[in-house]
Amino acid sequence: MNHQTRVYNSIFEMLPGEENPSPLVRINRMNPSPDFVLYAKLEWLNPFGSVKDRAAWEMLRDLEERGELGNGRGVVEPTSGNTGISLAAMSRARGYHMRAVVPNRVPLEKKVLLKIAGADLDVVSDELCPAPGAGGEGSINLAKTYAKAQRHRYALPNQYENEMNVRAHYRTTGPEIWRQTEGRITHLFVSLGTCGTVTGTSKFLRAKKPDIKVIAVQPSEGHDVPGLRNVSQLGVSKLFDPSLIDEILEIDYKLAYRRAMELFQNEGLRAGPSSGLIYEGARRIIERDKTGVGVMIFPDDIFKYTANMVRHIPSLAEGLHA
Ligand SMILES: Cc1ncc(COP(=O)(O)O)c(C=O)c1O
């Protein structure tokens, strides 16, 4: 493996870590304060397309090490899409089958991608799933049922409760950011889904520098931002630790889509809606704090959300047909 020439023996060698960090790219035209240095950490450049490569790999490796996989036993996972895509690709590449249980309102692009990646797919109806924008309770329960009723066939990583999800970020995301900013980071901007990202990264960075401000964003009630949870939906995320977060900003979820488009059009960053929401949170804090060095963890890109984008910005549907 050589990160200079980028020649690899398998896709797994491309997974991010301190020696192969995901890129930090500076925000220029959309930075509201000249005295604040703002970076986006581009998690869509991970090999399976999102921040979830980190948690999926840590959870899968842990199951493998404990002898839980193989001999016909694969994985089943409740997911809003990204964890499922990472887990499906990784599992299949190692010879295991994978079943993804997703809420109905997960974008069509993600459902199709899961199937292309080789996952068996269960779609849970909205009534069963009171948290449609995220991996709701219905899908979590169904995945648990598979794992219980068919123990010989399924191991359940369960990203909502699995400490490996936190450890992935403690072991990789935190150290990467510390090294990439040479310890100058003053603000960390993140979103809340399973909370693996915020808990693991904050734990590592706070141990290095206790006064780093950790700012989390959450979408307003009734949102449709896949992967994210607002406080009323956070109950199932056992990895949520408020002591590691300084502030939680609630932001109108429609801004997630608007800001995502602006990031592409003004910064060349093909950021997805959760990144858009994180940017809006950062923008508000920078207007208040004025100076510092901030890192936004941008979970994934816009390609999986074109249908959602058209719903929020209807003019995108104009002029598409001859
Ligand atoms: C697009 C997107 N944004 C943000 C998140 C939140 O990350 P975490 O689950 O680590 O809190 C996820 C995770 O599911 C996601 O898929």
Image (cartoon, rainbow, N blue to C red):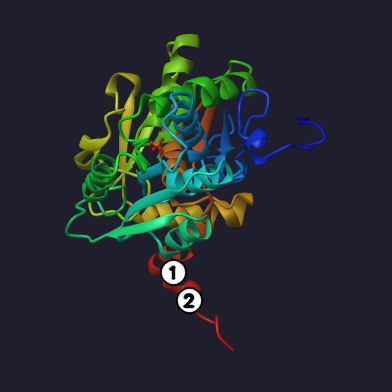
User: Of callouts 1 and 2, which one flags the residue occurring earlier in the amino acid sequence?
Assistant: 1
* Numbered tag placed on residue 310 in the rendering: 1
Residue at 30% across / 61% down in the picture? 104
**Screen quadrant of the N terminus:** top right
Residue 106 image offset from top left, x and y in percent:
36, 58
Quadrant containing the C terminus is bottom right
Rendered-image quarter of ligand 1: top left
Q: Residue furthest left?
A: 127
x 54%, y 47%: residue: 92
> Height in image: 124 above or below 3?
below
The residue at 39%/65% (across/down) is 312
Residue extending furthest bottom?
322
The residue type indicated by label 1 comes to: Val
From the image, tell me which residue sits under label 2.
317
Helix, strand, or loop for circle 2? helix
Residue 6: quarter of image? top right
- The answer to whether residue 214 shows anywhere in this view is no
Answer left or right for 210 relative to 171: left
> Is 13 or 279 nearer to us in this picture?
13
Q: Position of residue 259 (x, y in %)?
A: 47, 52
Between marks 1 and 2, how big is the CA–CA gap? 6 Å
